[in-house]
Amino acid sequence: MDYNTIERAKELSITVIRQAGLIAKEKFDNFNEISMKDQHGDVVTEVDYLAEKIIINAIQEAFPDHQIHSEEAGSIGQENDWLWLIDPLDGTNNFAIGLPIFTTSITLMYQREPVLGVIYEPLTDRLFVSVIGQGSYCNERPLQVRSNPTLLKGNIGWIQGHVVQNDSRATKLRQHIDLKFKRMMRLWAPTLQWCMLAKGDIDGIVLYNSEGDDLYSGLLMVQEAGGVVIDFEGNPFKGMNEQPYLIACHPDHKEDLLAIVREGLSYQHLESGSFRAR
């Protein structure tokens, strides 16, 4: 792994993500174009495309051999050890209805593992940066996941994929978590929830079948802030998975949160292999 490449990528990402975020900030509550994206009710706005173009053009100019996958543009370039994942507006539905909860996310993967994550929240001017082996930072302040001695009085983030919708297992688990903890949060801006966990603002995340271009920047952010990420069978999560089922938290809470998730799923789905990593 070339750490010089990662450092160059970090500097580029910080520059272009601020440029993309400025567009989102200027057009918040002031955009013109919106359209339905798919049958699940997701939407796309002009800001998604404008921000995406800025980021893709900069990456292509600086790293012409790297592959890119972006939320709207799809795959660009040949398969490569280096893969950029871009979500130009994570939380588009929030943005579209005037809810100020959205970010821009850039991830660099090396051989299917995240090595750089940059997430920008333009309305608060919070820049989250994580590099493998170097920790996670918010506006240059180090981040650390929190151990909560009263976990059941804590806040747990819930993230689910658009394809999940009315999946009965997801509904059952979501309700179980909602009853077990003080608050179950659903922001519909996953990268922000990952940053909140890395920052110590929430106590855990349960993710149900939600990959996408916004996953791995946040995952690295939490791991580099001292958190653990495991699947529903308790195994450390590695690589990429098109249908991930994940738990993330402080290491102190791994077994407790895993037990609660298993309780919510009533074990039968685990025993049948429904959530076995592929």
Image (cartoon, rainbow, N blue to C red):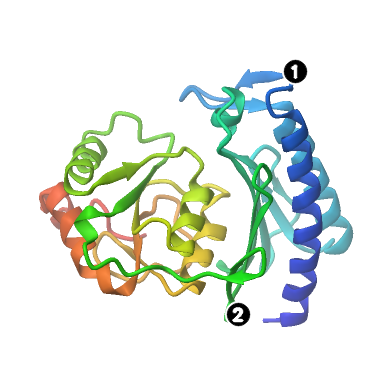
Q: Is residue 91 left or right of residue 126?
A: left
Residue occupying image coordinates x 17% and y 48%? 180
Q: Dot 2 surroundings within 10 Å: few (below 14), some, or many (20 or more)?
A: few
Residue occupying image coordinates x 69% and y 29%? 28
Q: Is residue 123 left or right of residue 20?
A: left
Q: Which mark is residue 134?
A: 2
The CA span between labels 2 and 1 is 41 Å
First in residue order: circle 2 vs circle 1: 1
**Front-lying residue, 130 or 22:** 22
**Amino acid found under the numbered disc labelled 2:** Gln
Q: Dot 1 surroundings within 10 Å: few (below 14), some, or many (20 or more)?
A: few
Up-down relation of residue 133 to residue 216 (above or below): below
**Front-lying residue, 203 or 116:** 203
Describe the element under mark 1 as helix, strand or loop.
loop
Q: Is residue 101 visible?
A: yes
Up-down relation of residue 29 to residue 131 (above or below): above
Q: Is residue 273 visible?
A: no
Locate residue 186: give its quadrant. Answer: top left
Q: Position of residue 230 (x, y in %)?
A: 33, 66
Q: Residue furthest right?
A: 61
Q: Is residue 95 left or right of residue 50?
A: left
**Front-lying residue, 269 or 7:** 7
Locate residue 88: give its quadrant. Answer: top right
Q: Which mark is residue 121?
A: none
**Amino acid found under the numbered disc labelled 1:** Asn
Q: Position of residue 30 (x, y in %)?
A: 73, 22
Q: Where is mark 1, residue-wise?
A: 32
Q: Position of residue 10 (x, y in %)?
A: 74, 67
Q: Position of residue 1 (x, y in %)?
A: 67, 81
Residue occupying image coordinates x 33% and y 61%? 277
Q: Is residue 218 left or right of residue 245?
A: right
Locate residue 93: give its quadrant. Answer: top right
